[in-house]
Image (spheres, rainbow, N blue to C red):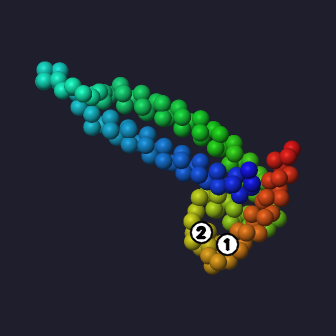
Amino acid sequence: MTGREYLIQIRDTDLNIKCKEREVLRLQQDIMYLQAIDYSKDIVSGGQPITFEDKIANIDALSNELMREWSGYLRERERARFIINAVPSAKQKSVLIDRYINGYTWEKVAELIGCSVQNIHNLHKRAIRNFEEIFKKVDSI
């Protein structure tokens, strides 16, 4: 895996975690709308009723998965931050942290650093080159 692929994996993991957090929130909100099952009515066959217990089980399973992913993500994010901090240029560090750790768009990174988007892309190329060199050294240890 290259250094850039590693950074992209960290950013993608963050997006995946945020998506699962929204899913847990949605499941929690769904519980608020569940109504008690009225067993006196005719039973319609062909499906499984979604009960309160089913929703709780889904939330528990997803929450456990989320916690495992968070744990691994935090470890890898700190490792990436350690490698990024070894990059010599402060602007290059900022580009890498804002893009891959904070997950900002290119436009937002340019705004934060005070450069044009084109300058950010050029700065990013140099930052990735420097990160790759450090990543290879750290990865071989």
Q: Are marks 2 and 1 in contact (CB under 8 Å)?
A: yes
> Could you tell whether 114 is left or right of 38 in the image?
right
The residue that appears at 74% across and 55% down in the rendered structure is: 3
Q: CA distance from mark 2 to mark 1?
A: 8 Å
Where residue 125 sits: x, y (%)?
73, 69
Which mark, residue 121?
1
Depicted 5 relative to depicted 58: above or below: below
Residue at the disc numbered 2 = 106
The residue that appears at 59% across and 48% down in the rendered structure is: 13
Query: Residue 32 occupies which quadrant of the picture?
Result: top left
Please name whichever residue, 58 or 114, is drawn nearer the observer in this view of the structure. Answer: 58
The residue that appears at 68% across and 77% down in the rendered structure is: 119
Going by the numbered disc 1, the residue's amino acid type is His
> Could you tell whether 79 is left or right of 19 in the image?
right
Query: Residue 85 occupies which quadrant of the picture?
Result: bottom right
- Identity of the residue furthest to the top in this view: 40
